[in-house]
Image: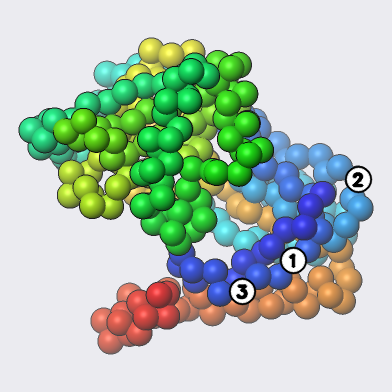
Amino acid sequence: MSAVALPFQLGARTLATVTRDLVLLRLSLDEVLAGTPPRLPDLDGDGYLITSLPAAALPALQTGGLTAKVRQRYVRHYTDLGIGHESWLASLSASARSTLRRKTKKAAAHGMAVRAYRTPAEFATFYPLARAISARTYQERLLDAGLPVDAPSVAYLQAAAAADKLRAWLLLIGGEPVAYLCGTAQGSALRYDHVGHDPALAHLSPGTLLQAAAIEALFADRFALFDFLEGDGQHKRLFASAGVACVDLLLLRPTLANRAAAGALTAFDGAAALAKRAGGHPALAGLAARVRR
């Protein structure tokens, strides 16, 4: 159990948070594919936060009288590495394959190269180079989701490398690192843990090209799946071979404080959804954009 800050979030911006003592249950891709609801451990706090619960398993979840709130819905995308690289390429649309070829040719003309890292010594080389890129990314500036700098997280990555449970890549342009991807193993999958690229080189699509190169390399590796984790995104839909509809579920004890928190989150999420729909209207698009900023 830990103190979890539940965000009131609009786009990439967190406007406020409410904190509750929750048991975090983050389902692995293997658990998601199994399709069965998790068994809730004994509770000593305000409730549970379950991420990547298969939507189809939601009716069978035993909540024990707790107040349930779905915070978000998304597809947990993944690539089945058992189908082989050629079959995976064939599964992409003709437009996607053409775009990848065009972008690869353009980046190659600027001196594109990809380097792979997996051992502890290689990770020691990779990490400072990737950190320099991460410091310039929107993931770090806006979402606090760059390559970690805290000692426990770095130690975790180092231990993963020592146990052959880490894979990392850099994409270089003209000899300079401009994009990174770092993943760790969980069950039969390699997770899409940390990714970013230099925004100054966005016109060369280094993140997309590095993702394609990493997936190609993984078809020759030992993993069965490449896990794009929670949330949606165009690049995930592009590269994934399949996905499972999932929800993030908040379960709270029916106390007065928890009911108030759940009500506030519900009201805000509803208003955010309304604002998102309004943002699609030409007359309101500019206003919605200013609100998100």
Measured from the top left, where is residue 283 in percent x and y?
28, 87
Q: Check disc 2 and report the residue beneath it.
A: 42
Inspect the image, locate mark 2, and give the three-letter code of the amino acid beneath it: Asp
**In the drawing, what numbered circle is on residue 19?**
1
In the image, taking residue 89 as reference, residue 5 lies left or right, namely: right
What's the residue at 49%, 31% (across, down)?
A: 183
Measured from the top left, where is residue 20 in percent x and y?
78, 63
Structural crowding at the residue carrying mark 2, measured as other residues with C-alpha within 10 Å and reported as few (<14), some (14–19) or many (≥20): few
Inspect the image, locate mark 3, and give the three-letter code of the amino acid beneath it: Ala
Q: Check disc 3 and report the residue beneath it.
A: 16
Structural crowding at the residue carrying mark 3, measured as other residues with C-alpha within 10 Å and reported as few (<14), some (14–19) or many (≥20): few
Measured from the top left, where is residue 7 in percent x and y?
62, 66
Q: Quadrant of the C terminus?
A: bottom left
What's the residue at 49%, 13% (across, down)?
A: 222
What's the residue at 33%, 31% (across, down)?
A: 170
Measured from the top left, where is residue 232 in percent x and y?
45, 50
